[in-house]
Amino acid sequence: MTRYNPLKELFLYRMRTFYREPEAMFWTYGFPILLTLALGLAFRSKPVEVIAVDIVASETAESIKAKLSESETVFDIQINEPDACADRLRYGKTSIIVKPGDDGTVEYQFDPTRPESTLARAKIDDAFQRAVGGRTDPIAVTDNEITKPGARYIDFLVPGLLGMNLMGGGLWGCGFVLTDMRVKKLLKRLIATPMSKTDFLLSLIGGRLVFTIPEMIALLGAGWMVFSVSVEGGLLNIIAMALIGALSFAGIGLLVASRAEKIETISGLMNLVMLPMWLCSGVFFSYERFPDVLMPFIKALPLTQLNDALRSIILEGATVFDQGIPILILAAWGVVSFVLAIRWFRWT
């Protein structure tokens, strides 16, 4: 007589349902790669940027244009009437307006909240002052543009995207699936089977861990092949850290979904949990930009610790044994969440 292990059967069920859903395959493997490619292309090393400039039509407009054209900075200069200049600035077709005054002065019109406008103002003023007044620098400087792998924005970005994907996979791959099963009344059918809540929840976590390694390899592989992203740490160290992160977020996902009865409810709860980490945990930019008063809260977030650990391993060549504090914080989040999920979970 064949004996069935509830955990094994549930795990196999999770595997079959996943691979029968093409949309799940895309969001698990395809979307992270597309996101990496899109952001990598957006922030790739680019040729010298051309700054769009509008000069208000006047008697001195042509001479100002000629002076700016002599600069080492590349300007795309147009002379237009005041209304046309204002419209072009409003619609983002130009970065700044130069308005010559009757007394030889120059007025710059720009939006200080737009980084390209602020940069254009500095570049134009420097070029104009040098051309008219012969401005010279008291100290000679040289520019050394950092474009080698390991020191670019894309190198900073890929570990953050990997951490974000592990967070999303853990929360949506466990929490959303659990609520979806409750909504479809599948959990009611499982009540009559000889299994415990622990076996059921562990099967969801086990299924999530199986998908973690292919996700990680696909994302890192895309970054390495397309953008030559530096991977200094050993693959086993990266896998171990990724699995720890996946376990932590899987526990959080189960806790969030332990009692949710509607898709709208779990969607709102997932966004409530993930939004602070999207913004504060250093996925797209360093969390060091936030005020010091927020640092204890930010560093307590599991995604912050996972991203820091992944960057340390991938970019600096550290090992998983060097990540004591991140692992402890991730483990605390995961274990406490899983224990509470078992306690508060209900089948219906």
Image: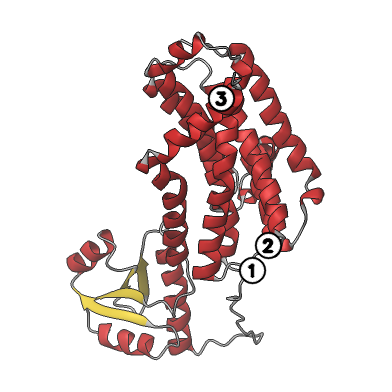
Crowd class of label 2 (few under 14; some 14 to 19; many from 20; radius 10 Å): many
| Mark 3 and mark 2 residues within 8 Å of each other at the beta carbon | no
Residue that badge 3 annotates: 254
Splitting the image into 4 quarters, where does residue 89 fall? Answer: bottom left
Residue 195 marker: none
C-alpha separation, residue under disc 3 versus residue under disc 2? 32 Å
Residue that badge 2 annotates: 315
Residue that badge 1 annotates: 150
Q: Secondary structure at mark 1?
A: loop
Residue at 59% across, 31% down:
205
Q: Secondary structure at mark 3?
A: helix
Looking at the picture, does residue 180 appear above or below residue 137?
above
C-alpha separation, residue under disc 3 versus residue under disc 1? 36 Å
The percent position of residue 175, horizontal first and vertical second, equals: 50, 27
Crowd class of label 3 (few under 14; some 14 to 19; many from 20; radius 10 Å): many
Residue at 69% across, 23% down:
336
Q: In the rendered image, is residue 308 in sight?
A: no
| Mark 3 and mark 1 residues within 8 Å of each other at the beta carbon | no
The percent position of residue 196, horizontal first and vertical second, equals: 61, 14
Give the mark nearer the N terminus: 3 vs 1. Answer: 1
Dividing the image into 4 quarters, which one contains the N terminus? top right
Q: Amino acid at mark 1?
A: Gly
Foreground tag (3 vs 2): 3
Q: Amino acid at mark 3?
A: Leu
Q: In the rendered image, is residue 345 in sight?
A: yes
Q: Amino acid at mark 2?
A: Leu
